[in-house]
Image (cartoon, rainbow, N blue to C red):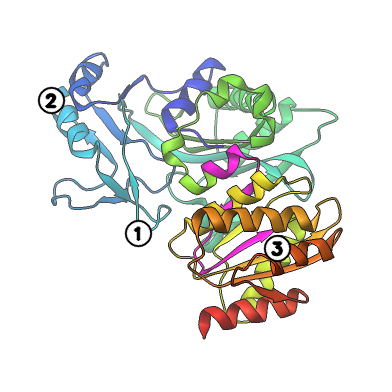
């Protein structure tokens, strides 16, 4: 689960991490009051969406003077006008794709005098199963671009969970960033606090870009992005309360309510599979035979008829889906349950696209019999290869 920048900065502030003072604005008429509560004389007006590249982004149907989702205002009135220009508009960045995201929140904060821009992030390293720091002197730009063009400017190291965070970790970050004097002590303190936040809040990513050295020589987190482990949200009620459902794909949001593992993709063949590994294999074989999957969907090992019905409805709600492949290998999952769910869903929402069903495993004969006696125009498949070939042929002609 991701959160907005202003929410991330609120968490940083609660851990004693230096951030600028700011105010959130939900309605344009609140902007002038919000800006007036800050010191100025420079205000930063930031569109709040779950995507990077806001400063270089552009608003749909905006005039030449309304560029970018991050702007500098030199007066309270100017900050108010910028907020009015952003709220309710669709911001397109390199991370949102051409569809963009609608801006429903604006964050106005005090401007900062910047001497240097740096990069600092904490991530879960899947290889070592440890928390890793990623550090670079090239702050204020996409870390992917730095990695591609100047990888030598990136330092990455992990923290041994047996020892936890130590002073030398902070000093290593400070030296990598070329910090001096009081900045080294500030960096050690910052690293300790960020690591504590990361562990205590079950984070998956904490990215500070840029971490700046101000004109007074102090460190400050100028921007912040955070993501959290969705599987741990049951014990992070205050983090869960920060969830902005308007930023999520409606289909993925609906799937989460039924404990379905669903991720929307850009292809034309909808997939309903049980098991993450089998789901990945199904997506791969669809690509092998010349088509693209429209989603990743794992109904799990203990799916009910209701869950299967809901999964089918989510797939068919995607206008890009031109065909559906149901691929079930029943171990814990029973094939007759899947069949009943598919039939129930088709009767409820209709079937406008080709449907191929491959069943194998527990109660497979009962499942096939339910499908065969349903009277529905369903294409049966003997195995995964057969199923993939049939759905691709049905879609591609």
Residue 95 shown left or right of residue 292 in the figure: left
Residue 76: numbered disc: none
Q: Quadrant of the N terminus?
A: top right
Q: Badge 2, how many Cα within 10 Å: few under 14, some, many 20+?
A: some
Do we see residue 278 in this rendering?
Answer: yes
Residue 98: numbered disc: 1
Magenta-colored span: 253-273
Q: Residue at x 59, y 72 (%)?
A: 377
Magenta run includes residue 370: no
Q: Position of residue 196 (x, y in %)?
A: 67, 23
Q: Nearer the viewer, mark 3 or mark 1?
A: 3
Residue 280: numbered disc: 3
Magenta run includes residue 258: yes
Q: Badge 3, how many Cα within 10 Å: few under 14, some, many 20+?
A: some
Provide the residue designation for mark 2.
Answer: 77
Kindly report the distance in space between the C-alpha atoms of the residues bearing marks 3 and 1.
Answer: 26 Å
- Check whether the beta carbons of the residues at disc 2 and disc 1 lie within 8 A of each other: no
Sequence-earlier tag: 3 or 1: 1
- Check whether the beta carbons of the residues at disc 3 and disc 2 lie within 8 A of each other: no
Q: Quadrant of residue 340?
A: bottom right
Q: Residue at x 79, y 47 (%)?
A: 128
Q: Position of residue 231 (x, y in %)?
A: 69, 35
- Check whether the beta carbons of the residues at disc 3 and disc 1 lie within 8 A of each other: no
Kindly report the distance in space between the C-alpha atoms of the residues bearing marks 2 and 1.
Answer: 31 Å
Q: Is residue 230 above or below residue 395?
A: above
Sequence-earlier tag: 3 or 2: 2
Q: Depth check: 331 or 15 in front?
A: 331
Kindly report the distance in space between the C-alpha atoms of the residues bearing marks 3 and 2.
Answer: 53 Å
The local secondary structure at tag 1 comes to: loop
């Amino acid at each position: 689960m991701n959160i907005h920048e202003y929410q991330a900065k609120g968490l940083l502030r609660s851990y004693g991490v230096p951030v600028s003072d700011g105010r959130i604005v939900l309605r344009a008429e609140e902007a002038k009051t919000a800006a007036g509560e800050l010191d100025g004389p420079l205000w930063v007006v930031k569109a709040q969406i779950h995507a990077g590249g806001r400063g270089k982004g552009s608003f749909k149907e905006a005039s030449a003077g309304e560029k970018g989702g991050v702007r500098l205002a030199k007066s309270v009135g100017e900050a108010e006008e910028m907020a009015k220009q952003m709220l309710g508009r669709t911001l397109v960045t390199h991370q949102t794709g051409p569809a963009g995201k609608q801006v429903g929140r604006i964050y106005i904060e005090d401007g900062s005098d910047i001497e240097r821009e740096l990069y600092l992030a904490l991530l879960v390293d899947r290889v070592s199963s440890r928390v890793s720091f990623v550090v670079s002197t090239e702050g204020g730009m996409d870390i992917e671009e730095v990695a591609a063009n100047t990888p030598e400017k990136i330092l990455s190291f992990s923290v041994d969970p047996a020892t936890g965070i130590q002073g030398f970790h902070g000093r290593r970050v400070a030296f990598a960033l070329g910090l001096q004097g009081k900045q080294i002590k500030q960096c050690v303190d910052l690293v300790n606090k960020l690591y504590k936040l990361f562990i205590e809040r079950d984070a998956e990513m904490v990215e500070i870009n840029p971490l700046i050295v101000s004109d007074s020589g102090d460190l400050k987190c100028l921007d912040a992005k955070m993501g959290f482990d969705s599987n741990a949200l049951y014990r992070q009620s205050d983090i869960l309360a920060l969830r902005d459902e308007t930023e999520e794909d409606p289909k993925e949001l609906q799937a989460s309510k039924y404990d379905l593992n669903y991720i929307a993709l850009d292809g034309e063949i909808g997939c309903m599979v049980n098991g993450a590994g089998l789901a990945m294999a199904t997506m791969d074989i669809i690509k092998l035979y010349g088509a693209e999957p429209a989603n990743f969907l794992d109904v799990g090992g203990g799916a009910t008829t209701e869950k299967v019905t809901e999964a089918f409805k989510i797939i068919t709600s995607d206008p890009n889906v031109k065909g559906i492949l149901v691929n079930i290998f029943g171990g814990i999952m029973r094939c007759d349950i899947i069949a009943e769910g598919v039939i129930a869903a088709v009767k409820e929402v209709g079937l406008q696209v080709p449907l191929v069903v491959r069943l194998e495993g527990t109660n497979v004969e009962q499942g096939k019999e339910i499908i065969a006696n349903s009277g529905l125009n369903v294409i049966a498949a003997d195995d995964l290869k057969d199923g993939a070939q049939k759905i691709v042929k049905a879609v591609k002609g």
